[in-house]
Amino acid sequence: MRYLGALRGTGTLESSGEAMGRVDYEFDGYAPRPDQVVASGEIRMDADALSNAFGRRDLSLRTDDGHVLAIRFSGKRQSAPNNAAHVDVYDGLPPAKRWRR
């Protein structure tokens, strides 16, 4: 598996096209195979909005630079209000050759 670099920025978390709140994100990208790119990392947003997003299966992150990334939570819901969560990105990532370290 080859490390591709990081994607960092801001965007809007959406569920079925409806905005749920502003997000800061940081994802690490990897190429497990030459034709595949995967990423995971952290999103940060308002704690109430983040809590409302947990359990949804139709989440996407619309980045301010124009990408739409399909995401899913990979960690458990925190019991205390929290503004950060770990996610996996499973669709919408740029190809390996467009990542910069």
Image (tube, rainbow, N blue to C red):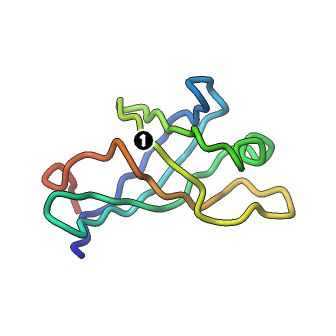
**Relative to 44, is 31 on the left or the right?**
left
Residue position marked by numbered label 1 in the rendering: 69
Residue 17 drawn at (x, y percent): 56, 24
Q: How many marks?
A: 1
Q: Amino acid at mark 1?
A: Leu
Residue appearing at x 24%, y 76% in the figure: 1
Residue 43 drawn at (x, y percent): 57, 52
Residue that lies at the very extreme toward the bottom in this rendered image:
1
| Rendered view: 74 above or below 2 | above
Residue that lies at the very extreme toward the top in this rendered image:
18
Residue that lies at the very extreme toward the front in this rendered image:
57
Quadrant of the drawing holding the C terminus? bottom left
Residue 39 drawn at (x, y percent): 38, 60
Residue 56 picture quarter: top right
Q: Residues within 10 Å of mark 1 (few under 14, many from 20)?
A: some
Q: Nearer the viewer, residue 71 or 12?
A: 71
Residue appearing at x 31%, y 47% in the figure: 93
| Rendered view: 13 above or below 83 | above
Residue appearing at x 55%, y 33% in the figure: 12
Q: Secondary structure at mark 1?
A: strand
Residue 50 drawn at (x, y percent): 72, 46
Residue that lies at the very extreme toward the right in this rendered image:
80
Residue 58 picture quarter: top right
Residue appearing at x 66%, y 45% in the figure: 45
Q: Nearer the viewer, residue 76 or 47?
A: 76
